[in-house]
């Protein structure tokens, strides 16, 4: 008796093989990041004093409406002062954001909240004096228009008083400055 050899075809098994080697599908939600290179006519804005030395102005989440923060350079925002508004460049295909300032409630208020919003700021005006970012309002005089606080969660506030005078607990006095280097370095 002679055995007859019949080769087996692997074609019917290919779908099973692909299942055994398939990787699970992953979907990642893209998160906006800061532009790696400074765009023309824009500036980085960063602190120059400890404990926030070379922490950069930005919103959190990045490039979205929300509180103003000083944080790591990896998500640094790009800014310009245009007609008294601090404008946040969120990208060529997106509308800009504007830094807004909380109106002062009374003479005793030491800090004013700041945040980024799609609407223009209606209280006070921003400017650069040299490279220092300043803010002033018509209804009161600040001893130092370049004085800022950075408080809990690295949030940025306007300091309504003098620099290093009566600093609220949990806050750090800062001045913040434009920086025109090609990248937001530390």
Image (cartoon, rainbow, N blue to C red):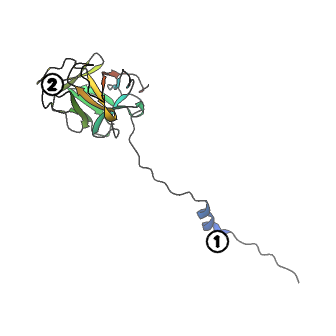
| Numbered disc 2: secondary structure | loop
Residue in the foreground of this view, choosing between 7 and 129: 129
Left or right: where 114 falls relative to 74: left
**Looking at the image, which residue is at 42% across and 33% down?**
74
Disc ID at residue 37: none
Whether residue 151 is visible, yes or no, is: yes
Residue in the foreground of this view, choosing between 112 and 138: 112
| Numbered disc 1: secondary structure | helix
Of callouts 2 and 1, the N-terminal one: 1
Q: Residue furthest bottom?
A: 1
* Number of the front mark, 2 or 1: 2
**Looking at the image, which residue is at 39% across and 38% down?**
33
- In the rendered image, residue 79, in percent from the top left (x then y), is placed at 30, 28
Whether residue 99 is visible, yes or no, is: no
Question: 10 Å neighbourhood of mark 2: few (<14), some, or many (≥20)?
Answer: some
Are the residues at dot 2 and dot 1 in contact (C-beta closer than 8 Å)?
no
Question: 10 Å neighbourhood of mark 1: few (<14), some, or many (≥20)?
Answer: few
Q: Which residue is mark 1?
A: 12
Residue 133: quarter of image: top left
């Amino acid at each position: 008796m002679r055995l007859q050899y019949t080769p087996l075809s692997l074609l019917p098994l290919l779908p099973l093989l692909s299942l055994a080697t398939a990787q699970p599908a992953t979907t990642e939600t893209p998160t906006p990041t800061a532009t790696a290179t400074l765009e023309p006519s824009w500036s980085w804005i960063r602190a120059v004093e400890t404990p926030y030395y070379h922490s950069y102005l930005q919103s959190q989440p990045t490039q979205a409406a929300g509180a103003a923060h000083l944080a790591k350079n990896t998500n640094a925002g790009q800014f310009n002062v245009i007609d008294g508004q601090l404008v946040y460049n969120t990208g060529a295909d997106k509308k800009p954001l504007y830094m807004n300032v909380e109106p002062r409630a009374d003479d005793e208020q030491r800090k004013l909240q700041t945040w980024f919003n799609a609407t223009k700021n209606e209280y006070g005006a921003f400017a650069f004096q040299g490279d220092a970012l300043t803010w002033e309002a018509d209804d009161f005089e600040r001893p130092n228009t370049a004085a800022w606080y950075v408080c809990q969660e690295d949030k940025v506030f306007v300091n309504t008083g003098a620099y290093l005078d009566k600093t609220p607990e949990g806050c750090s006095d800062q001045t913040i400055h434009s920086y025109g280097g090609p990248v937001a370095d530390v």
